[in-house]
Every structure is written in C-alpha cells, then in structure tokens.
Image: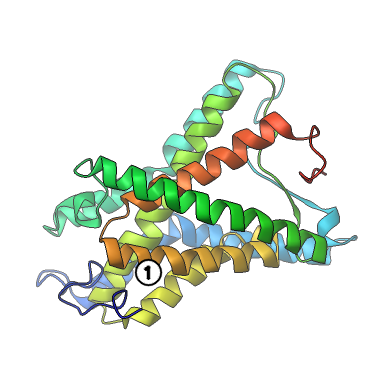
Amino acid sequence: MEACVQSQASDPARFPASEELSARTLRHETLLVLALSLGASAVSALISFIGSLTASGALADQSARLNTSRAPDRPWLDLAWQLFGIATALVPVVLVAHLLTREGAGGLRSLGFDRSRPGFDLGRGAVLAAAIGGSGLGFYLGALQAGFNLTVVPESLPHVWWRIPVLILSAIQNSVLEEVIVVGYLLRRLGQLDFSPWAALAVSALLRGSYHLYQGIGGLLGNMAMGVIFVLLYRRWGRVGPLVVAHALIDIVAFAGYALFAGKVDWLPTP
C-alpha cells in the first residue's frame, strides 16, 4: 500500500499550481469542467434515483436504460443522433487537453493518455478488465437479487448494421471521458489544491459512484470500489491509458454482450 501513496514529487496527480493560475482559478476551473461533464451527470443520476425510490414497485422491477434509440423507425437519423451524442460527450476531454496545454503541462500526455506505451496500456488494461469485469458482474447480480439495484439494460438499439459499431464507440467514449476527467484531471487539480492523497482518492471514487446512482445502490457502491482501485493503479503506473483500455473493454463486453445474448441466457437479467 505504501507504494500507492507517493510523495508530492513522485505522485503524477500532485504538481504545484502554475504561478499564473491561482488556487481560486483552479477551483473555479475544476468546478466548471465537472459541471459540463460528470458532475452534471451525478446530479442527473441523483434525481433519477429519487424518482426510482418514489415510484411504485421495487427497484429490481424498474430498469435503467443505456444506449437507447433516438429515432427507432428512421435508422439513418438515429445513427446521426448516436454519433452526435458520442462526439459531443467528448468535448470536455478536449477542454481538459486545452487547459493542460495552456498550463504548460503537455496536454493529455501529462496524464499518460498518449501512444507512447501501447503495449503497456493494452496489456495492463486487458488484465484489469478481466479482474474488474467478472467481479463487477457478480456484484451487480447480487445487488439486483437483494433489491438494491435497478435492472440495467445496456442497450436497446434497433437491429441495424451499425448497432454493434455504435455500442463499441459508446464504450470507448465512456472510458475516455471518465478516466481522463475523474482520474487524471481531477487528481491533478486536487493535488494542486493541496488535497491529501487519500482525500483526493475519496473525492474521485465518490464522484465515480455518484453518477452511476441511477442504477441503484449497487451501482453507487460497485463503481466507488472500482474508483478506489483505478486511483491506486493510476498513482502506481502514472498513466490513465491502461484505465481507459480496461474501462472500454468492460463496457464493450457489457454493451455488445447484452445485444447478442439478452433473452437467450437465463442468468442475464432483462426487464
């Protein structure tokens, strides 16, 4: 554990704030980035969860739907909406890249999101995905059985040629957005604002869990645990690249697997 909690000099998340950027500016900047991205998603998830709690019926009898159709009877229009949503969801990542470049930090390279170590990122990410994905599925099924979670429907797109490619792009978008902002960027800014390593870890993990609250208590707790692991590994490796790979693989299996096997295997919950 000592290897995971590093000093300010060696921790990739802890750098002194630029002389041109005051602590107040960094705080405001961080809040704005979150308000435009996953912070807003956390508020939306809370409202959704309150709605689920106050609705008639148990949580397990309700569903949380991801990757839904925007124009079910018009495939090309639906595809345009899907691609538009994926592209615009990545704008906060572009903003973070700009802010880090302005700071003189080297953009996303400073977070370990580049092509300098593809073998490392792919190898570590694949192993991490296998470990997290299997345990995460077991936790979800247990939470659903216990009545703490909604039934998650990873996709409900029409059966058209672009269905699987769009699900893969959606998974990659989720992974890039979350790992760049909730791990790399947020930890860097919290370090500059003199948060302790453990306080920064708690903030990052709580944020990750909070924007999954629309799935239920299981979604909150399971993703908080994932957040703790990802932060510790980021501090150890100094790169978000493996985390992006792992997250993308987990979501690709979840999205595409549901598309291929929902209703065909008994153990996969469906509404």
Left or right: 121 as drawn, with respect to 61: left
- Front position in the image: 211 or 3: 3
Residue 132 is at least partly visible in this image? yes
**Split into 4 quadrants, where in the image is the C terminus?**
top right
Q: Is residue 266 above or below residue 144?
A: above
Residue at far right of view: 57
Q: Circle 1: is it few (<14), some (14-19), or many (20+) Cα within 10 Å?
A: some
Q: Is residue 240 left or right of residue 247?
A: left
Question: Image height check: is 200 above or below 62?
Answer: below
The answer to whether residue 29 of the structure is visible from this angle is no
Give, as a three-letter code, the residue at label 1: Leu
**Callout 1: helix, strand or loop?**
helix
Q: Quadrant of the N terminus?
A: bottom left
Residue at the spot x=69%, y=67% of the render?
A: 217
Percent coordinates x, y for residue 109 in the rendering: 20, 50
Front one among 213 and 103: 213
Who is closer to the viewer here, 54 or 214? Answer: 214
In this orientation, which residue lies closer to the viewer: 122 or 259?
122
Above-or-below relation of 95 to 3:
above
Residue matched to label 1 = 232
Residue drawn where x is 56% and y is 63% of the image: 223
Across and down, in percent, residue 11 comes to 23, 71
Q: Residue at x 26, y 75 (%)?
A: 191
